[in-house]
Amino acid sequence: MKFKHESVMPDEVIDALKINPSGIYVDCTLGGGGHSLRIGRRLNEDGLLIGIDRDIDAITAAGENLRGLNCKVEIVHENFSELGKILDGLQVDKVDGIIFDLGVSSYQIDTAERGFSYMHDAPLDMRMDRTKNFSAYDVVNNYDEEDLKKIFREYGEEKFSGRIARKIVDVRKNSPIKTTGELVKLVESVTPKISSGGHPAKRIFQAIRIEVNDELKILRDSVATAVNRLKVGGRIAVITFHSLEDRIVKNTFADMARDCICPKNFPVCVCNHCAEIKILGKAKVAMPDEVEKNSRAKSAKLRAAEKIL
C-alpha cells in the first residue's frame, strides 16, 4: 500500500514556526513528509531539515517525497524520545523550530496488516516501529487483569475497563487472542451498543496502541528536550489528537512558561526558576473546510510556543 497521509493544519504549522530560510528545523514525527515538505520548500541551500520517525515505511516514503529540496536533509529512523542523542550525533546544538504531529497516521490505520484498526481483521500488532518485538498481542495475552484494567481506564478513558479486562483474561485461558477481529467481538460482547461516540472498541484500541508504543510516557520529556534545544526565538509546534496528549503538552508548556514553580503554599520563591518559553496564544483547531476534507483533523489541536531564555 502506498504511504498516504494528509498532514493536519499545514498552513497553521508554517505560520507558527515562522520559518527562517537559513534555519534548522526538526520534524519529530516525519510520516510521509507532509509538514517537512512545506518547511523544506521555505529553506534555502544553507537550511537544514531533520526528519525523525520510528516507522520504516514512513522513512522510505518521506525519502522519496523530500527529494529535490534545495536545503540539506537528514532522515533518521528513531523514536523522537532520542531527540537529544540524534541532534548530538548530527553535531547540531540548537535549532530554529520543531514540529510534533502526534498519534497514529492514516497510513498505519488504513494498512490492515498493521493491526491498528478495529475495522479490519488482522494480527494484533500496533507497533509503530516494527523492528521492536513488543506488540498488541503481548499486551492482550500477557498483561494481568489489573494491568489491563488500568491501561483501558487511563489511556482509553473506558468506563467498562474492568468488565473488558476480565473477559480478556477469561477468553485467553482457552487459547490466545490473536487478531483484531477476535478482540473487537470480545469487547462488543461485554459492552452496550453506543448510539454516539464511535465503536465500543475504539477506546480499547487507543489504549493498547498507546501502551505498545509508550506514547504518553515519553511525551513530556520529549517536549521539554525539544524546548531546550531551541535557539532563543526558535519555535515549537505540537499537534495532538486526544485529550490525554493535549493535557500533557498544555501542562508542559504552562510549567515552562512560568517564572516560579514552587508549591503554592510556599511563602517565598526558592526555586529560582525562570520562564523558558512564551506560549503563542490558545490552542488552534482545524477550520471547517479542512475537517470536511480530512475527518482526522476534527479532533486535532495545535499548540505553539517561542523560546525566550
Image (cartoon, rainbow, N blue to C red):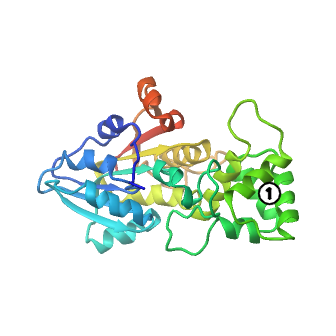
Picture coordinates of residue 248 (x, y %)?
Answer: 57, 49
Picture coordinates of residue 283 (x, y %)?
Answer: 47, 34
The residue type indicated by label 1 comes to Lys
Q: Quadrant of residue 26?
A: bottom left
Residue labelled with disc 1: 149
User: Residue at left 22%, top 61%?
Assistant: 73
Q: Is mark 1 on a helix, strand or loop?
A: helix
Picture coordinates of residue 105 (x, y %)?
Answer: 47, 50
In the picture, measured across the screen, residue 140 lies left or right of residue 8, that is right
In the picture, measured across the screen, residue 288 lies left or right of residue 135, that is left
- Closer to us: 304 or 231: 304
Q: How many marks?
A: 1
Picture coordinates of residue 131 (x, y %)?
Answer: 49, 74
User: Residue at left 77%, top 51%?
Assistant: 185
* Mark 1, other Cα within 10 Å: few <14 / some 14–19 / many ≥20: many
Question: In the current view of this chain or complex, which residue is farthest to the top?
Answer: 288
Q: Can residue 304 be seen in this view?
A: yes
User: Residue at left 39%, top 54%?
Assistant: 3
Position of 277 relative to 217 (above/below):
above
Position of 207 relative to 299 (above/below):
below
- Closer to us: 283 or 108: 108
User: Residue at left 47%, top 31%?
Assistant: 285
- Closer to us: 67 or 281: 67
Question: In the current view of this chain or complex, which residue is farthest to the left?
Answer: 45
Q: Is residue 103 visible?
A: no
In the picture, measured across the screen, residue 84 lies left or right of residue 185, that is left
Q: In which quarter of the image is residue 27?
A: bottom left
Name the quarter where the N terminus is drawn: bottom left
